[in-house]
Amino acid sequence: MILARRAEAMFWAGRYLERAQQTARLVDVTYHSVLERPAQEPSGEWSEVMRALVVEGSFASRGNGAVVEDVDAVLRFLVDDPDNPSSVRSCLTSARGNVRSVREHVSAEFWTAVNDLYLTLQARDVPAELRAEPYELLSVVRRRSQQIYGAAADTMLRDEGWAFQTLGRQLERAAAMTRLIDVRLDRFVDSDAPASFHQWATVLRSAGALEAYRWVHGHSMDPRDAVDFLLLSGEHPRSVLFCLRAAEDCLDRLGPGGRAARRVGRVRAALDYRTVGEVLDRGLHSFLGEVLEAIDETASRIAGEFFDSWTVGPVTSVAAR
Amino acid sequence: MFTDYDRGNGFYDEVFDADGSPRPHYRLLLRRLKELTTGELAAREQLRDQLFRSQGITFTVYGEDDGVERTFPMDLIPRIIPWDEWQIVEEGVAQRIDALNRFLEDLYVGERAAIRDGIIPWWVVVSADGFKREAAGIELPHQARCLVAGIDLVRDDEGTYRVLEDNVRNPSGISYVLENRAAMTRVLPRVFASQQVEPVDHYGRLLLDALRSVAPAGAGDEPMIVVLTPGVFNSAYFEHVFLARQMGVQLVEGRDLVVDDHAVFMRTTTGLQRVDVIYRRIDDDFLDPVVFDPSSVLGVPGLVGAMRAGTVTIANAIGNGVADDKAVYAYVPELIRYYLGAEPILPNVTTYLLWDPDQRAHVLDNLDQMVVKPVAASGGYGLVMGPSASDEELATAREQLLAEPRAFVAQDVVSLSRHPTLVGGDRLAGRHVDLRPFAVTGDTTRTIPGGLTRVALREGSLVVNSSQGGGSKDTWVLAADSPSWEHIDTDVEVGTT
């Protein structure tokens, strides 16, 4: 049995920690990709990143005249801006706040790891580092995020709190990957202009999947193979299918047969029983749109089923007297 | 270590008698301590600091910048109480709690016999801040209103234990008792092992048993018990977490609970779960916005209604603040005689009630030798120590107590007993101490052996509260069959100026 408030805190801690790590990776890869890019290749990576992180609108509407070509402004916005709820700083602050509110129910190692990363970011002059050389800061965020996960996995009871945290993490990861495929890969599918090697590597690095992809698909630069890997792989821990399966496992444990479990089960099945050819025949972009919608719906059903503070009414589980 | 120690006079020294010789029950400790080199002692202190820091045993001090979290310093030299002395304390505390429970039950549910028979005036009772009309008619199983009680004791210059104050609303500090003991066994294991010290780690069990015993009728064999906390920003939050863990029960905040049809439920992910007993660490005023302070967001609307309907038991009961009141404290010995037909085992400290003209005159004539205390304060706040107060402070105190005699009491300054305490390096000096035993009452009263010995760390200070810069010591009650160590030669004698 777990208090609704606690479950919600763990769920959002999982989501925010994943989002922080994902954002850091994306920014890191894009920044260095732009540096190394052959001059004749089109730019536009930063606006892609904004779309992938769903912050294009809020960047534009900040109204301070910053444009996406102003890399300094973009970096600060994505990494450091407290008014951007999805910046790395905001994500870590929210994650830490959530974990702190349930501190007595998580392991000391997990809390310490989260708190330490938050404090590290507070202590550094982030804008200066972003201007000079963002690699070290971003790599600290990435590595320590992994350490956080490792500490948690190593020390925490596999109870409902753990399941909610995992659920949040996996749904966040699935959504992020879906958007990434849409924004970075879709244009190369069925296109006459194939990806250059550089673009290809950028896509896969953004997904944290370059080396794993090479193990499975060698040096193939066929976009179909990339979609197959990033969307449908049963073995790569970042693939959309892998994450949805993990989320479904959590929900089968927490609320078997419930509305959220059924919704995620449906979308998981949609991926499980299709080949990449069938997905592409349907149209990748629209298919990915449906997957995103399903993930969003699952998240809101989770809130309704588990968190939304039980309004007083029919009582569904009371000890018999 | 003891070469410069001055036992002084005018105080009872816990370790050294009037001639400067160590009391028998401390002799073995002193022998063991002498075996520690200066370097070893320093190393042990560092280990202790490390333990406390990594466990996060902190409390928040209000009134400082940021409400900083600090560790509650534990001095390495334990305070030792022999078994027969402890028996007196234990019985005296149980007697006092029994009388208070009877008084409170009589007041809120009974005929108010003590008031009717002139033992304590009605107006004194109802003018206490902690008096709550809302408690009227709400019975407690076993009359266990003071389920957790912290009866603070001091020793006067003759070595007599006296009750300094009764804390029966929300006494805290037990977590320090348990953590101090755990630290001592890690930091000075050989010293500890050489004696037979009564354990304290069963407190969680005692508390859980008491809470079970007050479950409402119909709660079944496994009543649902929770600890209700105001949340992470409360200064004692660490202790709330600690107790919930010790007992293996849920820690909840007000927003996790909901009252429906006069029963209390917990919001879980699988539905509303009925709650039977709440160990609440929230003051009365914030407990239920429907009945008490409507602006409080810490409590549970309708909670008092549920209590009244008998579907949930709250510990400690509401309205206990009457007994915390320092003016009511003055009547407790009479209440013991009235309700129990027995002489109080533990006497009070002489207390003057300021609405009585003779007592007031005496106090005003001797203000610089008195302690003036607000009747409703806790944590040592608002105290005026006559002997060390400035002329302005005394003048202000005089004005205040003339303006509102009901709001203050005055007491003779008690020369609290002193205990050797490490004050830097391996230097020992005498510091004033008190004792807060923790008693848990369900169907019967059980006391943790020892309790919290608080130390006023500043030289000459008599104020021991954590919020005022106090520290603590591990408190050892020796087993009943401990050998007498009178024959042990410690080579320690100290000066008595």
Image (tube, coloured by chain):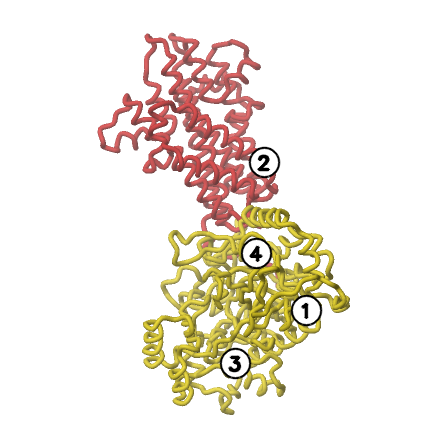
Chain colours: A red, B yellow
Task: Estimate the spatial distance between the alpha carbons at disc 1 and disc 4, rounded to whole Å.
Answer: 20 Å
Q: Chain of mark 2?
A: A
- The percent coordinates of residue B105 (x first, y second) are 54, 79
Label 3 neighbour load within 10 Å: few <14, some 14-19, many 20+? some
Q: Which mark is residue B427?
A: 4
Q: Amino acid at mark 3?
A: Val
Q: Quick check: do tags 1 and 4 share a chain?
A: yes
Q: Quick check: do tags 2 and 3 share a chain?
A: no
Tell me which numbered mark, 1 or 4, is placed earlier along the sequence: 1
Q: Which mark is residue B23?
A: 1
Label 2 neighbour load within 10 Å: few <14, some 14-19, many 20+? some
User: Which residue is identified by label 2?
Assistant: A153
Q: Amino acid at mark 2?
A: Ala
Q: Nearer the viewer, residue A259 or A107?
A: A107
Q: Is residue A313 visible?
A: no
- The percent coordinates of residue A76 (x first, y second) are 33, 29
Q: Quadrant of the C terminus of chain A?
A: bottom right
Q: Are marks 2 and 4 in contact (CB under 8 Å)?
A: no
In the image: residue B445, left or right of residue B457 = right
Task: Estimate the spatial distance between the alpha carbons at disc 4 and disc 3, rounded to whole Å.
Answer: 55 Å
User: Which residue is identified by label 3?
Assistant: B109
Task: Estimate the spatial distance between the alpha carbons at disc 2 and disc 3, rounded to whole Å.
Answer: 54 Å
| Helix, strand or loop status at disc 3 | loop
Q: Is residue B272 above or below residue B441?
A: above
